[in-house]
Image: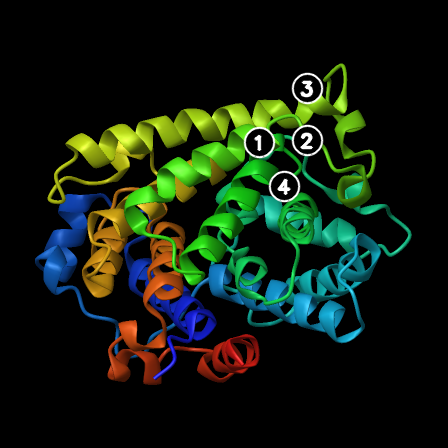
Amino acid sequence: MPKQPATGALLGLALGDALGFPTEFDDVPSILVKCGPWREMELPERAFVSDDTQMTLAVGRALRTAMDRGDVTPRGLEGPLRAEFTDWYRSPENNRAPGGTCLRACELLTDRHRAWQDASQRGSKGCGANMRVAPIGLAPGLSGEQRAGAAQLQAALTHGHPTALAAADLTAHAVHLLAQGTDPAGLVGRLRSYALEQRTHYDHAWLGDLWTRAQDPGPEHFIARGWDECLEILDRLGEALRTASPETDPCLATGEGWIAEEALATGLLCFLLFPDEPVTALRRAACTAGDSDSIACLTGAFAGARLGAGAWPADWAERIEYRGDLLALGTLWDA
């Protein structure tokens, strides 16, 4: 049976989101009291997701629309992204405790005459930038430049801090590498090399004059600030993989995940502690003191991209909210 990495990643992301949604804002002792031993955590019978999955689907649909119209370009993707984000903002289903940055930026994006760079929340590097980026790493046929540009653009529409852009790019790259069969043991090294290669590359075609809204002397200085923070957290991740116990809250090693680079690192840490045990990885990610749903949704995307649709228990996959939408995108891209 084919691996189906896109289906596996999208289902895993939503399952992690649903597992971590009830534990977000709780510390680990409180989660253990509520849920029992973390290795035995069960998906809620009604497996509701948060805005993390809703926004992932928004990015996925926007990318599908852009690809249906031809080559994926900055202008060709910006319009569908903007439409999907504003539809989400106005939706009655937007009631899952979304982040303030996304709400503020999406409200501003509803004004069609406003440049997206003026809607972007330039001081924010919240994990909303990269919790939703997995579709960019899964869609087939994108060049490396398109993948990086699209990942940064979808982040920048709401989160304009350079670290949000770099972390979203790295997250999409990690999903892509795992879907292509990269050995988890070499993943952190490959991400570090990629960050060093990209460190001073500001893509004007995809980002326009976003950098001028900050106080940096030039675009290369602007974007390098983001990559440097990501390189720092990748070093912390490498150290954690050498020293951390799986029984210890991963947030103690790589951060609580409220900001983009920490969500990436802690999501990767949970996956890499259990590269061949995807459900255990999800449970570890959901039993964390930080932004549990975002950490677990990234862990699920990484594990599902590597192991495919068969990674997840059938009874879990059958009752996840938005299952039809997730499978539609996954099936399209796995084909």
Closer to the camera: disc 1 or disc 2? 1
The residue that mark 4 highlights is: 159
- Residue 258 visible in the displayed image: no
Q: Nearer the viewer, residue 111 or 187?
A: 187
Instruction: Pick whichever of labels 3 and 4 is earlier in the sequence.
Output: 4
Real-space Cα separation, disc 3 to disc 4, in angstroms: 18 Å
The residue that mark 3 highlights is: 221
Instruction: Pick whichever of labels 3 and 2 is earlier in the sequence.
Output: 2
Q: Secondary structure at mark 4?
A: loop
Instruction: Pick whichever of labels 4 and 1 is earlier in the sequence.
Output: 4
Real-space Cα separation, disc 3 to disc 2, in angstroms: 9 Å
Q: Secondary structure at mark 3?
A: helix
Instruction: Pick whichever of labels 3 and 1 is earlier in the sequence.
Output: 1
Q: What's the amino acid at mark 1? A: Glu
- What percent of the width, then of the height, locates residue 113? 91, 52
The residue that mark 1 highlights is: 197
The residue that mark 2 highlights is: 201
Taking the image as shown, residue 48 lies to the left or right of residue 127, namely left
Real-space Cα separation, disc 2 to disc 4, in angstroms: 18 Å
